[in-house]
Amino acid sequence: RFIRQNFDAKTIEIRVDANGAFDSKEALSKLNQLAEFELHSIEQPIKANQLQEMKLLCQQTPFPIALDEELIGVFGVENKRKLLEEIQPQYIILKPSLVGGFKGTLEWISIAASLNIGWWITSALESNIGLNAITQFTYTLNNPMPQGLGTGGLYTNNNGKDEEYQKNVFDFYQEDFLRNTACFPSPGNHDYAGKNDSSLPPYFQLFTLPTNGEAGGVP
């Protein structure tokens, strides 16, 4: 409210992310309440896999909806097209690390373009190396919209501390991603920052890993 009292929508663009927090029966009412703030868009207002509810919401919303978690785990061009044709969102948000890499991202973009659906790219769990690659990839796509690459977080408040991983990775992605995905530590240089034992940074302490080849190596 403070922002809109001091800056109009042409001066400052506001995008918000519900992370699927709205109940499907109350979502439209909440969107109508948020409309007074002249938002650019809202990400994933209700949880993924409620196709009919999301479709109806996209039809009735007072401002654009962008699918995010809805795209994760959907593979194959036919399945992707079926999802977008069914829901008809105004935008989709693409995290290359979670939607099949660069190839999968380009498939989503091609389908979205054919359906007149906008898109932008954001980062997810990448180290600075991965984020650098995604940033350069995004540049080649010539999308004039502001992207959500999170490069600021790469250089500030990114000390590889236990509480940072807990809040920004494990708590955030626990239900929809981590429960269904095999994860293995692969730290970047920032994971060794801070007052930590350099031989055992928090990144490794937070994972329980095989130590005797239980995953298929030497017994």
Image: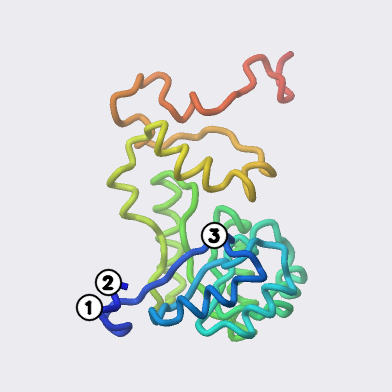
Name the residue beneath numbered marker 3. 19
- Mark 1 and mark 3: Cα distance apart in space: 27 Å
Q: Which is in the foreground here, disc 3 or disc 2?
A: 2
| Mark earlier in primary sequence (1, 3) | 1
Q: What residue is at 58 percent from the left and 34 percent from the top?
A: 184
Amino acid type of the residue tagged 1 in the rendering: Asn
Q: Which is in the foreground here, disc 1 or disc 3?
A: 1
- Compared across the picture, whether 100 is left or right of 124 comes to right
Is label 1 in contact with label 2 (beta carbons under 8 Å)?
yes
- For the residue pair 142 and 25, the one nearer the viewer reads as 25
- For the residue pair 145 and 45, the one nearer the viewer reads as 45
Name the residue beneath numbered marker 1. 6
- For the residue pair 161 and 97, the one nearer the viewer reads as 161
Amino acid type of the residue tagged 2 in the rendering: Phe
Residue 181 percent location from the top left of the image: 66, 43
Name the residue beneath numbered marker 2. 2
Q: Does dot 3 land on a helix, a strand or a loop?
A: loop
